[in-house]
Image (spheres, helix red, strand yellow):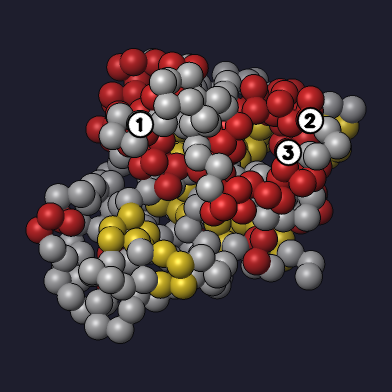
Amino acid sequence: MTDAVTPGLQGYDVIGDVHGCADTLERLLDKLGYHLGPNGYHHPRRQVVFVGDIIDRGPRIREALLLVRTMVESGAAHMVLGNHEFNALMYCTPNEGPEGGYLRPHSPRNAWQLAETLEQFADYPDEWQDHLDWFQRLPLFLEWHSFRVVHACWDAHLIACHRARFGSGHFDRAFLQETADSHSVAARTKQRLTSGIDLPLPQGMSIVSSDGVERTHFRTKFWAPEAETYGQLLFQPDPLPEGVSEQPIDPAHRERMITYGENEKPVFVGHYWLKGRPAPVAPNIACLDYSAVKFGRLVAYRFDGEKQLDPKKFVWSYVDP
Ligand SMILES: [Mn+2]
């Protein structure tokens, strides 16, 4: 666990998916009372925790990444990796196994996900490589005495396994190489922690999500043991196809569900493209991704050690279209 050892530190501001919205991030930090000094943004009594997904999609990825990294390296912030950073790492890392290529295949869809980032770093290849090296030094999850942060899903079992191997949320080159095999523990850990639990739609069905991608799976809650239907388990803005919502959850799918107990310490995630007014999704769970890059809100939660999250402690900046 990471202990709050910084003298005078009073709390943490957990910030959701930035996705290249650097201007909005600057306005949010300003609103939260952070000041831009010679070593980047900082606050005399608070630290930021970024939930990951700083890159891809948005207009100022390079600036956002530099801002965040400067804060982390100066001690003003912490960060866990999002699926976008881990995917970028896999996309750009050669597979050292006999199959060769890259850890993440250069398919049109995978290329599309990283296109905006690679485009913005096209004239700065050394800088991009240096960021990739930095991603490899960041953890998949963080835990303090009073709260936890992971990009998409706090899976206690996989986290315990990861800790048994690495002692923390960090990982090494061997782990990164192992993620190329989708059946490996490494791949399952990366997928579960940074992308959550996806369930397949019934045979032949698909959803075209709001970003135009056709999906055969949908995103689910990791804390809904009482859910009986797929609709009660759904956790994404795009609705299920007609009729699927009311269907009872298949026992095989139920086996893949996990829970997050109501007495567990608060956990913060991003990832899920929420819309509307920010609020806790459970008394001890907050998702901070409110679709900033789709002209939603960039959201922070001001955490001061409370056991039950308070709807009044969300702060946000709107993205200027
Ligand atoms: Mn995201």
134 left or right of 201?
right
Q: CA distance from mark 2 to mark 3?
A: 14 Å
Q: Amino acid at mark 2?
A: Pro
Q: CA distance from mark 2 to mark 1?
A: 28 Å
Q: Residue at x 37, y 48 (%)?
A: 196
Q: What is the residue that sits farthest to the front in this orientation?
A: 99
Q: Amino acid at mark 3?
A: Leu
Question: Circle 2 sits on which residue?
Answer: 125
Binning the other alpha carbons within 10 Å of mark 1 as few (below 14), some (14 to 19) or many (20 upward) gives some
Q: Residue at x 47, y 48 (%)?
A: 269
Binning the other alpha carbons within 10 Å of mark 2 as few (below 14), some (14 to 19) or many (20 upward) gives few
Q: Nearer the viewer, residue 59 or 39?
A: 59
Q: Earlier in the sequence, mark 3 or mark 1?
A: 3
Q: Amino acid at mark 1?
A: Asp
Q: Nearer the viewer, residue 318 or 170?
A: 170
Q: Nearer the viewer, residue 306 or 31?
A: 31
Question: Circle 1 sits on which residue?
Answer: 181
* x then y, percent, for residue 204: 28, 71
Q: Nearer the viewer, mark 2 or mark 3?
A: 2
Question: Circle 3 sits on which residue?
Answer: 65
* x then y, percent, for residue 258: 23, 47
Q: Which quarter shows the C terminus? A: bottom right
Q: Is mark 1 within 8 Å of ligand 1?
A: no
Binning the other alpha carbons within 10 Å of mark 3 as few (below 14), some (14 to 19) or many (20 upward) gives many
